[in-house]
Image: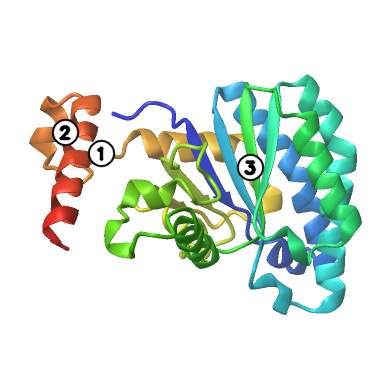
Amino acid sequence: MNQTPQHIAIIMDGNGRWAKKHLMPRTVGHVRGAANVRHIVKACNDTGIRYLTLFAFSSENWRRPADEVSALMGLFLQYLENEVAEMKAAGIRLRVIGDRSAFAPLLQSRIDQAELDTAYNTRLNLTIAANYGGQWDVLNAMRAWQLAHPHQTLQDMDAAALAVHLSTPELPDPELLIRTGGESRISNFLLWQTAYTELYFTDVHWPDFDAAALKSSLYWYAQRVRRFGRTDEQVHTTPEWQADETATALLDLAARLKIS
């Protein structure tokens, strides 16, 4: 049986549908969703989760109505201005991943300052994915690897070498990904990092996803058998550290032999 995951990733979906259900504008749903971030961050911190990654705004979300995008940017700025001091006091380190160049200069400045202010905190590592896409992340990593190795070809690159250049090199891969709001897809979120992540989909809309709902997802995760390509018998008889080392060695061998 699994222990509590050290890294949880969450696709915070359903704000608009929550608002529609309550006969309110979509922007009200986003306000309630932003307020719920505080509660879930606190619940994860209290539970002993080490890493929490939240999908706040995808690279595809720019296609939404301009007023909704503007409201989301305003909420992001407000969150940074209102929550960083409390995060610092609570031992939470904040990182933001994604392409920041599309954000207004003030928002970029607030992101930079928030990361600096919390850089030495170690209790919970909170990562916000904003203007982020998994395909963008992998392409950026490939380009970064090529720049770092100008005299080598892609044949010289392996999975470990590429992972160093992703936007999450300091984070372990998520053990559990939660998506709220009733959809059953990962929507271009952490495509590389979630290769063996357990996927938990719930109909609960993000504004209603509370500490009890988080506890339910953790209970579900605890019942999962994480095989990583092995059989049940191997899982129950092989220590996890040894299995991880064996899997890594086999993947490296397959890469060298060009086995897909």
x then y, percent, for residue 183: 52, 65
Residue at 53% over, 60% down: 137
Q: Quadrant of residue 101?
A: bottom right
Q: Are marks 1 and 2 in contact (CB under 8 Å)?
A: yes
Please tell me the numbered disc located at residue 225: 1
Looking at the rendering, in which quadrant would you find the N terminus? top left
x then y, percent, for residue 160: 34, 46
x then y, percent, for residue 42: 69, 29
Vertical comparison of 136 with 75: above or below:
below
- Residue 196 appearing in the image: no
Report the residue that reaches farthest toward the front. Answer: 151
- Judging by the rendered image, the residue that carries numbered circle 3 is 127
What's the distance in space between the residues labelled 2 and 3, CA to CA?
Answer: 31 Å
How many residues crowd mark 3 within 10 Å: few (<14), some (14–19), many (20+)?
many
- Judged left or right of residue 169, residue 154 is left
Vertical comparison of 30 with 10: above or below:
below
- Judging by the rendered image, the residue that carries numbered circle 2 is 235
Residue at 25% over, 26% down: 241
Q: Quadrant of residue 44?
A: top right
Q: Nearer the viewer, residue 115 or 145?
A: 145
Q: Secondary structure at mark 2?
A: helix
x then y, percent, for residue 228: 23, 44
How many residues crowd mark 1 within 10 Å: few (<14), some (14–19), many (20+)?
some
Identified by mark 2, the residue type is Val
